[in-house]
Amino acid sequence: MRLIVLGSGTNMHPKRAAAGYWIETDKHLLFDFGPRTLQNLVRLGLDRHRLEHLFFSHYHADHFSDFITFFFDAVIHATYVAPRPPLHIYGPKGTKRLFEAMFHEFPTFSPAPFKTSVTELTDQTIQLGKTRVTAGTVVHSRKLACQGYRVEYGGRTCVYSGDAEYSRGLVTLCGHADLAVLDCSFPLEHPGKGHMTAQDCGRVAHEAGVKRLLLSHFYPVAEQYDVKRQAAEKFDGRVTMAKDRMRIDLRSAGATRPSQEDLRFR
């Protein structure tokens, strides 16, 4: 299993792309598609025209907006250059309504020259080849249904919280994961509604018994403080701050490559 961070920041972060995470198992999976993540995907040489499974945690713009550019490009490429495989889109309640409206209203989006399916997931598990993906409800916005995701493959587990506050449901979703990618929007000194502070992330990781914690989704204020230290006050395992285009390989159950090999830029 391999995780590639396409975006570790927020909507208007001056140095980081917004939320986006590529996970490779026997499938290629993309979790969220925030602004500037498509550019990082292209820079890394990842083949967007072979991407088949796209998961959304929720539909705030910083987790979604690059899908519009991606899909327009996919339609043009499949029409004039080469065919692509079907695209399967997954997300929380409201996903079907949103995409039906988008496909109907956006010029050239429908009919697409490839099959597209849209599936809503709430607290359930699906099997994609040898990969299991579990969606679990997280607490972020009362106006939106929000899901975090747990990916299991070959005895290894990676969890992505999406935007989330601390909750028992998130702890359960992260249970004994090899890697947990958690919403570290704010430092302890400046908490924000609907998100976690670094200490909240450490608390989730400790209570869930995860092996490694990856802090991500930083607002600029978070980087003015030692959020890694703050998380470590609650979690005595390995803590890493995400960076755009970071790659983490989970080589075997419960194991990761040495830290000096975590960053690989192409």
Image: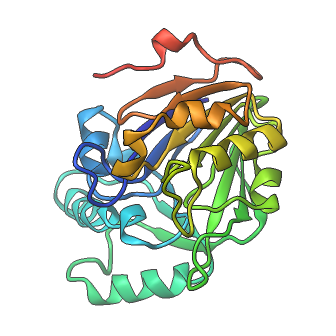
Q: Nearer the viewer, residue 175 or 28?
A: 175
Residue drawn 39% across and 66% down?
64
Residue at the extreme left of the image, as rendered: 80
x, y percentage for residue 33?
39, 57
Image: 105 above or below 82: below
Residue drawn 28% across and 22% down?
266
Say which quadrant the N terminus sits in.
Answer: top right
x, y percentage for residue 72?
24, 67
Q: Nearer the viewer, residue 264 or 101?
A: 264
Residue drawn 74% across and 26% down?
236
x, y percentage for residue 248?
52, 25
Report the label total. 0
In the picture provided, is 43 more to the left or to the right than 147? left
In the picture provided, is 186 more to the left or to the right than 244? right
What colour scheme governs how the chains and residues are painted in the rendered image of this protein? rainbow
x, y percentage for residue 178?
72, 31
Res 180 quadrant in image:
top right
Residue 130 appears in the picture as rendered? no
Res 232 quadrant in image:
top right
Residue 157 appears in the picture as rendered? yes
Residue drawn 76% across and 61% down?
167
Image: 174 above or below 125: above
Image: 240 above or below 38: above
